[in-house]
Structures are given as structure tokens and as C-alpha cells.
């Protein structure tokens, strides 16, 4: 059997078993239904970055969602930039979704009106069920939309570690607990613990943080920084400050005590120099009993991220988002991960979308392709059997996230 035949067989097997989507930003379905969708909905979210790099201005991008401008005129604005990004991985998920759900073989000047009409006709109750459950065989999506009232078992909440410790206004009246005034550092820590307990009681299975530079936490330094804000000695602390370092460390420790996973955004976005996954090493060492889900394979620091998985028992590596950043990179790094990382420490898929739920399917198709290429080559080289490859794929797409997040 040649590689392509093995890959096809593995993809067919993956299409039959349940998947846990390890990272989304999907809101409750009602938010999607309240949105007027069109062809440009499929190029919102991450495609915005590619359009910007291709030369589209913020004003031009904003015009795509202005329904006072005709669909034709908006397409004319969009098309020159679309022609530059349509071969990228971000856009590929949209092409796959358009074909699967709306019968559009190619998104272009001849099809955008038909695609828009089909999307608007299909934007009705049950769209999440049709896309996530029926088309994707997703059991649940771990979603981060800032709320826990999601209305369906297809969505399971993760909540942010929502601290803002740079100004007294933010510190004294924290947004994560309304109607409460903070007077001492311990007041703030008590509110943080109440927040963690509340979101857990509402179904949250994890807390999300960023992999930023952190210093060794010191309660004394934190007390002094707190007092400097409270007493008006400084108007604002810098982003990296001892109060932030201490409060976040205490939150990680308390979250771990509550058996919540600590999900960590690493790598790509904005000034990605601040998001190096290696910033996490001191925290991983200080909290050996916490479970850390390292997002996006640290892209572009993918090999460094693999070494976190190689060296720390409390680390899981999450391929969310990565398949639509670069399939070629994922294939190379996932192949290397098989050499390096125990198979129970890899989470194979997370779509990472908000409004365009259809693209979850497109992304999942790409993820299955990447997994099939990596494992199919090893089957062809007789390093494992096809049944063993299918079992590994099932671990990555379902069993590992189910175990990590204690999903029922």
C-alpha cells in the first residue's frame, strides 16, 4: 500500500470517531444567529491578519462588515487582497467550509453572491449541531468567550485569569467580580479565589493565561507595589511588575488545587517576542502539581515547545490553531514530536474560531490530513501498524483532551 492510500485510510478512520475540539472562541449559538453573515464572515477572525499584511487598511477591512455598502462594492474592495491570501492556510479552511456546507467549489467573483445567500439561509437554529456534531463529530469544544452560560454541551467553558494590576482603578474594582471594592492585597486574592470557584461551579474546566516574562513572585514586593498604587505614589505600574507576578502565581496555585487546567497562550500574535513559551519554565518548575496545556505548539518556537513536552511531566502540547498557521510546519513538528513526546501528551486539534463556526470543519479536515501524513509515513516504513496509527490518532483527537480536562 502506498503512502497516499494509507493516508486516505487513516483519514477515513478519523472521520468515524469522536473528537474533542481543544480550543475555540465560539460564543453561544444565539450570538451567531444574531449576526448578519455573508462571504466576508468566512474571512473574519485570523484572515484579517493576512489581509492586513497583504495591504488592506483598517478602514477597508471595516467596510467589509458595513451593510450600507452593497455586497458587490464590498467584494470589489476585498478581491485584490483576497487574491493574495487565498492560497494560505488561513483561507484554505474557508474554501473547505464553503464547499462542504454551501456547495461552492471555489470562492470567486462568480460565486460570492450565491455563497452569501446560502450562508444567510443556513444561519438558523441548529447550526452548531449541524457543523460541530453532525459534520465534525465533535463531542464538545473547549471555548473561551468570556462567559459560562453557553446553552449546549457542545461548548465547554474555559475562563481567563482576568487580572489587571497596573492601576488602582482596575485593582480596587476588579472587573471579574462586580460591585466589590478592594482595600488590601488579601481582599484581591480572596476575590480571585471566589472567581475561580464560581467559574468552576458554572462548568469551567480550565483557566487561561499568557506566556509572558514573569519574575520570581515575592509577597513583600507585591505588598509594596500594591501600597504604591493605593497611596497614589505611582499612577500606573509597568506591565511586568511584582504585584502581577505574585497574584498570577497565587491564581495558578489555587486553580491547580481546584483541579483546573492552566491553559497557556504562547507564540504567535502581535509582538510575539513577549509570548515565548520558554517564559513558562520557572512557573512549570514552581507548580509541579498543576496541569499546563501549552497552546499553539509555541509557534514559531515549535522546537522549544517540544522540549517543554519532553522535559516536564506537567505539560501537554496543544496543536490548536497551528494547522491553519502552516500545515507544513505542523507535519514536520508533529513527526518530530512522535520521536520526542509520550503519545498521551499531545492534543491534536483546536479550531480557534469565533463567529465563523463553519471553519471549524475546514480546520479539522486540515488537521486530519496532517495527522494522516505523519502517521501514514511511519506505517509505510513499517514502524507501526495501521491499527496502531489509528489508536494514536484517537488519543490525540479525543482521549488525551478528555483525560486532561476530566471531561465526562
Image (cartoon, rainbow, N blue to C red):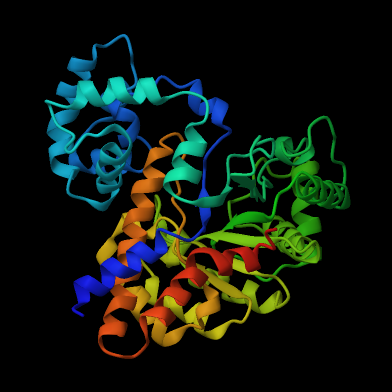
Whether residue 330 can be seen here: no
Q: Report the residue that reaches farthest toward the top.
A: 68
> Is residue 406 among what the camera can see?
yes
Identify the residue at horizontal 38%, vertical 54% (top origin). 364
Residue beneath the point at 60% across and 56% down: 209
The residue nearer to you, when weighing 112 against 172, is 112
Q: Judge left or right: residue 4 versus residue 316.
A: left
Q: Residue at x 52, y 71 (%)?
A: 395
Q: Total of numbered circles in the picture?
A: 0
- Position of residue 277 relative to residue 26, above or below, is below
In the depicted structure, whether residue 104 falls above or below residue 397: above
Q: Is residue 114 left or right of residue 363?
A: left
Q: Position of residue 210 (x, y in %)?
A: 56, 57
Which of 178 and 376 lies nearest the eye of the viewer? Answer: 376
Residue 335: where, in percent of width, then height?
Answer: 34, 78
User: Which of the 4 quarters of the picture holds residue 112?
Assistant: top left
Q: State the quadrant of the N terminus.
A: bottom left
Q: Position of residue 238 (x, y in %)?
A: 59, 51
Image coords of residue 193 (percent x, y): 83, 52
Q: Residue at x 46, y 37 (%)?
A: 130
Q: Is residue 405 left or right of residue 220?
A: left
The image quadrant that residue 154 belongs to is: top right
For the C terminus, the quadrant is bottom right
Quadrant in the rendering for residue 244: bottom right
Residue placed most toward the observer, 108 or 235: 108
Q: Is residue 117 above or below residue 386?
A: above
Amino acid at each position: 500500500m502506498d503512502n497516499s492510500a494509507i493516508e486516505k485510510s487513516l483519514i477515513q478512520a478519523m472521520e468515524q470517531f469522536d473528537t474533542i475540539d481543544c480550543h475555540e472562541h465560539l460564543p453561544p449559538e444565539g450570538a451567531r444567529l444574531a449576526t448578519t453573515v455573508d462571504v466576508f464572515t468566512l474571512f473574519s477572525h485570523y484572515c484579517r491578519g493576512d489581509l492586513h499584511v497583504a495591504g488592506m487598511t483598517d478602514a477597508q477591512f471595516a467596510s467589509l462588515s458595513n451593510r450600507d455598502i452593497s455586497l458587490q462594492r464590498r467584494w470589489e474592495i476585498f478581491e485584490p487582497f483576497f487574491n493574495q491570501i487565498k492560497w494560505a492556510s488561513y483561507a484554505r479552511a474557508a474554501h473547505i467550509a464553503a464547499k462542504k456546507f454551501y456547495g461552492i467549489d471555489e470562492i470567486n467573483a462568480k460565486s460570492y453572491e450565491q455563497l452569501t445567500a446560502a450562508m444567510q439561509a443556513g444561519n438558523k437554529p441548529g447550526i452548531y449541531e449541524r457543523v460541530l456534531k453532525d459534520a465534525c463529530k465533535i463531542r464538545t469544544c473547549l471555548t473561551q468567550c468570556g462567559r459560562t452560560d453557553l446553552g449546549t454541551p457542545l461548548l465547554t467553558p474555559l475562563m481567563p485569569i482576568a487580572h489587571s494590576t497596573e492601576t488602582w482603578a482596575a485593582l480596587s474594582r476588579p472587573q471579574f467580580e462586580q460591585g466589590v471594592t478592594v482595600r488590601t492585597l488579601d481582599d484581591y486574592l480572596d476575590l480571585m479565589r471566589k472567581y475561580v470557584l464560581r467559574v468552576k461551579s458554572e462548568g469551567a474546566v480550565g483557566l487561561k493565561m499568557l506566556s509572558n516574562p514573569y519574575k520570581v513572585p515575592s509577597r513583600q514586593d507585591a505588598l509594596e507595589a500594591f501600597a504604591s498604587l493605593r497611596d497614589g505614589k505611582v499612577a500606573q505600574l509597568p506591565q511586568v511588575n511584582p504585584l502581577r507576578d505574585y497574584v498570577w502565581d497565587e491564581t495558578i496555585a489555587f486553580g491547580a488545587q481546584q483541579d483546573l487546567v492552566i491553559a497557556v497562550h504562547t507564540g504567535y500574535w502581535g509582538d510575539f517576542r513577549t509570548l515565548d513559551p520558554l517564559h513558562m519554565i520557572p512557573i512549570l518548575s514552581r507548580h509541579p502539581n498543576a496541569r499546563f496545556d501549552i497552546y499553539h505548539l509555541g509557534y514559531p518556537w515549535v522546537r522549544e515547545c517540544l522540549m517543554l513536552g519532553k522535559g516536564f511531566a506537567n505539560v501537554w502540547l496543544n496543536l490548536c490553531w497551528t494547522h491553519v498557521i502552516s500545515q507544513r510546519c505542523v507535519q514536520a513538528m508533529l513527526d518530530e514530536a512522535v520521536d520526542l513526546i509520550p503519545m498521551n501528551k499531545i492534543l491534536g486539534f483546536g479550531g480557534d474560531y469565533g463567529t465563523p463556526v463553519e471553519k471549524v470543519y475546514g480546520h479539522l479536515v486540515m488537521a486530519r490530513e496532517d495527522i494522516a501524513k505523519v502517521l501514514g509515513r511511519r506505517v509505510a516504513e513499517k514502524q507501526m501498524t495501521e491499527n496502531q496509527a489509528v489508536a494514536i490518532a484517537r488519543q490525540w483527537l479525543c482521549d488525551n483532551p478528555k483525560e486532561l480536562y476530566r471531561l465526562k
